[in-house]
Image (cartoon, helix red, strand yellow):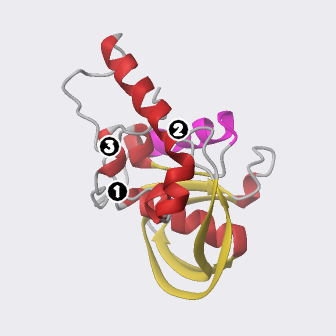
Amino acid sequence: MHSIVHYPHPSLRRVAQPITSISKELEIQVGEMLELMYKNEGVGLAANQINENNRVIVMNSTGDPTKPEFECVAINPSILEQKGWTEGQEGCLSLPGLYYNIRRAKKVKVQAYNLRGELFEMVVTDLEARVWQHEIDHLDGKLFIDKMGTLGRKNCQNEIDELIAEYYEKQKDGLIDPHLQPIL
């Protein structure tokens, strides 16, 4: 079973590779991602957050595992159009305990493949649009803290420093490969 990696794990800065075929392994990975997302009370999760190097995200903007009709699995997702702007609070399962207002497009048109290999497009707004943007950023090696201005980053620096210290402590304890150098 996978686990969610925390900042500053290097996989969070890696640009994920496109998926070329749908396999049983990918289906298992998606199932684990959904399980981890719900277990950690998230609304989305990208593959590199579990140290996988492929372009897949899972999401459920309700965050409610009893509402699977809102689940979405997106393989090789992309944003085709963005409209309007809104600011709202974001958090991240890879940066636990850190929340900040981030500016994102209010409405996006997205495209991806589902687990059956079928291409789909949809237009989403508000929280759902924010989740798509946040998770696709992950696949591109970007974090929501990268969207903070200087003042925002300064206001959150203590929490970021704590995550960095925890990372080094886990390396010292042998829980993280000592050769994995964090990318800040």
Membership of 33 in magenta stretch: yes
Q: Amino acid at mark 3?
A: Ser
Residue 158 circle label: 2
Neighbours of disc 1 within 10 Å: few (<14), some (14-19), many (20+)? some
The answer to whether residue 15 shows anywhere in this view is: yes
Q: Residue at x 29, y 61 (%)?
A: 18
Q: Magenta segment, which residues?
A: 27-41
Identify residue for label 1.
Answer: 141
Q: Write down the residue under mark 3.
A: 11
Which image quarter holds the C terminus?
A: top left
Residue 31 in magenta?
yes
Give the quadrant of residue 122: bottom right
Q: CA distance from mark 2 to mark 1?
A: 22 Å
Q: Residue lying furthest right in this view?
A: 66
How many C-alpha atoms fall within 10 Å of the one at disc 2: few (<14), some, or many (≥20)? Answer: few
Q: Amino acid at mark 2?
A: Asn
SS under mark 3: helix
Which residue does the image show at 45% across and 30% down from the upper left?
Answer: 2
Considering only order in the chain, which callout, 1 or 3, is on the residue closer to the N terminus?
Answer: 3
| Badge 3 density bin: few <14, some 14–19, many ≥20, Cα 10 Å | many
Which disc number belongs to residue 82? none
Question: Residue 111 at x, y = what percent?
Answer: 48, 77
> Is residue 94 shown to the viewer in this render?
no
Secondary structure type for disc 2:
helix
Secondary structure that dominates the magenta span: helix
Q: Which quadrant holds residue 173? A: top left
Q: Are marks 2 and 3 in contact (CB under 8 Å)?
A: no
What is the distance, in whole Å, between disc 3 and disc 1 at their CAs?
8 Å
Residue drawn where x is 39% and y is 17% of the image: 169
